[in-house]
Amino acid sequence: MSEGGNQIALLPGDGIGPEIAAAAKRVLEALGDFEISEHLIGGASIDEHGTALTDEVLEACRQSDAVLLCAVGGPKWDTTDPDKPRPEQGLLGLRKGLGLFANLRPVRPSEALLEASPLRHERIEGTDLLVVRELTGGIYFGDSGRDGDRAHDDCAYTVEEIERIARVGFEAAGERGGKLTSVDKANVLETSRLWRETVTRLAPEYGEIALDHLLVDNAAMQLVSRPTDFDVIVTENLFGDILSDEAAMLTGSLGMLPSASLGESGPGLYEPVHGSAPDIAGTGRANPLATLLSVAMMLKYGFGMHEEAKRLEKAVDAALAQGLRTPDLTGGADIREVGTEEMTDAVLQSL
């Protein structure tokens, strides 16, 4: 989460990836002097090299100051054969190879899209929260197996793993509204009790941050009943996976959600939450906004360019406020359907 040089590894990927990558390049060129190198990942890399992520591409990403990934996957590469490469292995290999342990997902519904949310307008208006999810530990990475009619998945965390993600949460809260909510299941799980103890022990180091704890089931309810009360949520891998998707639906469209994955050093990985949408690939109808908002996160966390990041977020809001919508978006009166290029033009004009 520090200022770097100016080198960006751009990974367009599959499906609509190359189209939204082109939009990102246009915006980056308008915002600063960046050195952008493009590389294959996912299905495109499987077709060319037989693997979803080559050592050369991983090394190029390591040598960059930030990595922007657009989308991977598609039915062309779907397989149940465990020996065949899958596009998603490229993303997992990238996370592991770059040592990324913190996933950041901001949820800030655009004023112009409030009608698109399944929740009432007045309930979500003013929502501006950030979910910080631990990415490399917990039940997804624990020992698992089957013995006859019994199966098990072990959840394990160390103090060190909890400390480093908690610090990301505290620091993010310090840059935002000064409030951190730690989510666990400490009334039942031993890992959660260790989690709560560790986060509580760190709190005095961040005296200006207001810390509270919520049990995950209660947090899930509160997210839909009072989303505006949250600032930063920090939680473990499984809970973070579920809560960030729940929070995502407040915005009404996956096509609007950016994310960042950060490590202790080296480049962060920035990517839209949506998939590769192979059904509309090549039609010019893809929504570039989640990718452009991921670029805003990259400017902020990867390059320390906070002003430019804010300008880009405001430009996205301004384009939507004009009534422009790609086909995946609804909401608002007097709307006009546009494609990838026209939406990008509008963002650039607002910049």
Image (cartoon, rainbow, N blue to C red):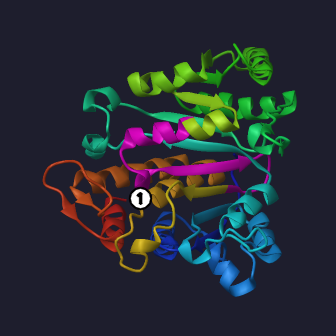
Q: Residue at x 61, y 71 (%)?
A: 78
Q: Nearer the viewer, residue 71 or 178?
A: 71
Q: x, y (%) of residue 161?
A: 82, 34
Q: Nearer the viewer, residue 124 or 204?
A: 124
Q: Looking at this view, name the residue that lies furthest to the front.
A: 148
Question: Which amino acid, mark 1?
Answer: Leu
Q: x, y (%) of residue 343?
A: 32, 66
Q: Quadrant of residue 153?
A: top right
Q: Looking at this view, name the residue that lies furthest to the left.
A: 334
Question: Mark 1 = which residue?
Answer: 289
User: Can residue 1 be seen by looking at this rendering?
Assistant: yes
Q: Residue at x 67, y 60 (%)?
A: 66
Q: x, y (%) of residue 84?
A: 74, 74
**Magenta residue check for 251:** yes
Q: x, y (%) of residue 350?
A: 32, 59
SS at circle 1:
helix
User: Can residue 230 be seen by looking at this rendering?
Assistant: no
Q: Residue at x 49, y 53 (%)?
A: 308
Q: Nearer the viewer, residue 148 or 184?
A: 148
On screen, residue 255 versus residue 317, left or right, reads right
**Considering the image in quadrants, where does the N terminus appear?**
top right
In the rendered picture of this protein, how many numbered marks are placed on residues?
A: 1
Q: Nearer the viewer, residue 178 or 282?
A: 282
Label 1, residues with CA under 10 Å away: few <14, some 14-19, many ≥20: many
**Considering the image in quadrants, where does the C terminus appear?**
bottom left
Residue bounds of the magenta highlight:
243-268
**Magenta residue check for 169:** no
